[in-house]
Image (cartoon, rainbow, N blue to C red):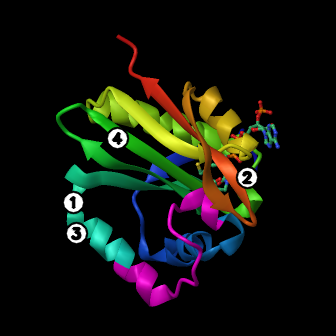
Amino acid sequence: MSSSRAILLRSRSEDDFEVLFHIAADLSTWEERNAASPAPLDRESFRARLAQADAAGSGKGVRFVIDVEGAAVGSVMLFGVDELARHAEVGIALVAEARGKGIGTAAISQIVEFAFVRCNLRRLHLQVIGSNLGAIRAYEKAGFVIEGRQRQHAWVRGKYEDILVMGILRPE
Ligand SMILES: CC(C)(COP(=O)(O)OP(=O)(O)OC[C@H]1O[C@@H](n2cnc3c(N)ncnc32)[C@H](O)[C@@H]1OP(=O)(O)O)[C@@H](O)C(=O)NCCC(=O)NCCS
């Protein structure tokens, strides 16, 4: 798997469930992906969460599977859509084996374009733990800039960490 292979965003199929569950239940990157405290996640709860997100409809956001040559390797989403101010939050996570190969940067760039061009959003934002240097670099490569720092805002695996707020504006 490398970044020279085709990376595309597509809708979820039942075949993707195990990969997505594996990512969602992974305690080693829990704090990178969740504001809530770490907790075990079972398949039934995750399936219910997906169903709830599906039922909320596209007005509440979109969630894509990140696909590399037919295999699901992660997901990337827009959520917290503000239809008046035209902004939304971005979230992304890849399986461990897919990280560090340019796939995250490509997927973030694709969802930025989708948000701006297809959804007519004009601003995207996100929060990232200050020590998550790979994520920060991937967001910067996709055009995000650091807009602020919430000092010692998060409790992450035994210590307080800053949370960086990053954002990107649609070019005029
Ligand atoms: C964050 C994530 C989506 C990034 O995707 P990715 O495919 O791994 O990232 P990329 O390979 O596209 O880019 C990573 C960049 O960070 C750099 N990087 C990685 N680790 C780094 C470190 N410790 N210090 C500095 N730079 C680092 C890489 O070298 C690369 O930059 P380069 O292309 O200029 O060399 C992915 O790692 C992931 O899913 N992580 C776990 C979940 C997570 O943290 N989600 C984000 C929550 S905000």
Q: What element carries label 3?
A: helix
Give the quadrant of ligand 1: top right
Q: Are marks 4 and 1 in contact (CB under 8 Å)?
A: no
* Chain-order first, disc 2 or disc 3: 3
Marks 3/1: CA–CA distance:
5 Å
Q: In which quarter of the image is residue 4?
A: top right
Marks 4/2: CA–CA distance:
24 Å
Q: What label does residue 57 carry, if any? A: 1
From the image, state whether disc 4 or disc 3 is nearer to you. 4
* Residue on which disc 3 sits: 55
Q: What residue type is labelled 1?
A: Gly
Q: What element carries label 4?
A: strand
Residue at coordinates 73% horizontally, 66% vertically from top-left? Answer: 157
Q: Do the residues labelled 3 and 1 touch (CB within 8 Å)?
A: yes
* Residue on which disc 2 sits: 99
Q: Is disc 3 surrounded by few (<14), some (14 to 19) or many (20+) residues within 10 Å? A: few
- Whether residue 70 is visible here, answered yes or no, is no
Q: Is disc 4 surrounded by few (<14), some (14 to 19) or many (20+) residues within 10 Å? A: many
Q: Which amino acid does label 3 sit on?
A: Ala
Q: What residue type is labelled 4?
A: Ala
Mark 2 within 8 Å of ligand 1, using the beta carbon = yes
Q: Is disc 1 surrounded by few (<14), some (14 to 19) or many (20+) residues within 10 Å? A: few
Report the span colored magenta.
30-48
Residue at coordinates 63% horizontally, 38% vertically from top-left? Answer: 105
Task: Let me know if residue 46 is in the magenta part.
Answer: yes
* Chain-order first, disc 4 or disc 3: 3
Q: What element carries label 2?
A: loop
Q: Is mark 1 on a helix, strand or loop?
A: loop
Where is residue 132 shown, x and y percent of the image?
71, 47
Marks 4/1: CA–CA distance:
15 Å
Compare residues 165 and 154 and report the one nearer the observer: 154
Q: In which quarter of the image is residue 40?
A: bottom right
